[in-house]
Image: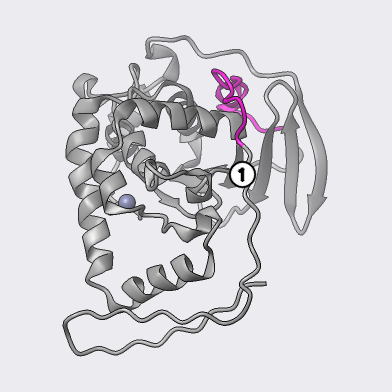
Amino acid sequence: MSRPLSLLLATAAFAAGFSCSGSAQPASPPPTDITFVRELAGIREFHVASNGLRVLLVRNTSAPVVTVMTTYHVGSRNEVVGTTGATHLLEHLFFKGTERFNRDRGTSLDQLLDRVGAENNATTSYDRTNYYVDAPSDQLPLVCDLLADHLRHLRLREEDRAPEMTVVRNEFENGENSPWMALNKAIWASAYTAHPYHNQVIGWRSDIENVPIGKLRAFRHLLLARQLHAYPGGRLHRGRRPRGGASALRRPPARAASDSRTLHRRARAGGPRRTVVHRAGEPGVVGVASTP
Ligand SMILES: [Zn+2]
C-alpha cells in the first residue's frame, strides 16, 4: 500500500529561508487548549480540547530528527459496496495536494519535504490509515502544517483520480499475481460474510476502476469526522507542551459526517469453511485462519 520512499538532501539555503508564514495563509497562534493526560512507558499523551485530537509524544534524542505520524481511525472496514478501496485510493490522492501545497506551485508535500531532507509515506489497513514524515527536528512546524492542511483541504480532483486509479489497479493486479495474497483474499472473504472485513483493503477491481470523485470526497469527510491521533516522536523537549506546528493541529475538522461508526457485527462462523483458489502456475499455498 505504501508508495516508494524518496529522499533528497536538503539545501541549506532553502532550509534557512523557508517559513510557513510565507505561505498563503498566516500561521495560527499557538493553541491554549492542550492539556497533559498521562505518561506511560515514556510516552506522553496530550489532548486538544477544541477538536479532540489525541497527541502522543515519544522522546528520542539519538539523532536531530523528528517523526510525525497521523493516524485516522478509518480504514477499509468503513467502506461499503461500491466504494471498496476508497480509503486506499484516498491515501494516494492525499499526495496530490491542496490549494496551498501543490506541484503546480512548486509547493507540493513531496517537493517541500525533499528540499529539507525529509521523507514521507503512508499505509492503509482495515481499521486505520496513517501518514508519517521523518524530518529534521527544526522542520516540525512545516511537517505539522503540511499534514494539517492536507487533512482539511485536499483538492481531490478528477484529473488526479483518473491516472492514480491505474496505479492502484496495478497494485491490485500485483496482489492477484501473488499466490499467497490471492488465497488470503479468499480466506477473509470466506471467514467474514456480513462484515466489511469481507473486502480486502485494496478493494474490488470494479470499485477501484469506477468510484466517482464525488464519493471519494464524501468519504474524506468520514476521515475528518473520525479525526486522528498524532504521534510526534524524536528530538522533543521533555516537559514541554507540543510546540512548533501545534497551532496547525488545533484546527478543527471542516465538518463531520453524519455517522462514521461501523454498524456491522461479525456473524458467527457456524463451523469450519474451506475455500480453494485455482490459478495457473506451480506454487501451492495453504492458509489456516480462525476468527474469535
Ligand atoms: Zn497504494
**Residue at left 27%, top 52%?**
205
Is residue 227 visible in the rendered image? The answer is: no
Residue position marked by numbered label 1 in the rendering: 262
- In the rendered image, residue 252 lying in the magenta stretch gets the answer yes
Instruction: Residue 166: give x, y in percent of width and height.
Output: 18, 46
| The C terminus lies in quadrant | bottom right
**Callout 1: CB less than 8 Å from ligand 1:** no
Q: Nearer the viewer, residue 210 or 47?
A: 210
In the image, taking residue 175 as reference, residue 145 lies left or right, namely: right
| The N terminus lies in quadrant | bottom left
Q: Residues within 10 Å of mark 1 (few under 14, many from 20)?
A: few
**Residue at left 33%, top 22%?**
155
Among all residues in the image, which is located at the extreme front?
Answer: 270
Query: What secondary structure is the magenta-colored segment mainly?
Result: loop
Amino acid type at circle 1 is: Thr
- In the rendered image, residue 162 lying in the magenta stretch gets the answer no
**Residue at left 49%, top 46%?**
130
Q: Which residues are magenta?
A: 241-260
Q: Quadrant of residue 177?
A: bottom left
Q: Nearer the viewer, residue 5 or 240?
A: 5
**Residue at left 61%, top 80%?**
271
Instruction: Residue 61: give x, y in percent of width and height.
Output: 59, 53
Instruction: Residue 202: give x, y in percent of width and height.
Output: 36, 54
Q: Secondary structure at mark 1?
A: loop
In the rendered image of this protein, does residue 228 appear above or below residue 201? Answer: above
Q: Quadrant of residue 133?
A: top left
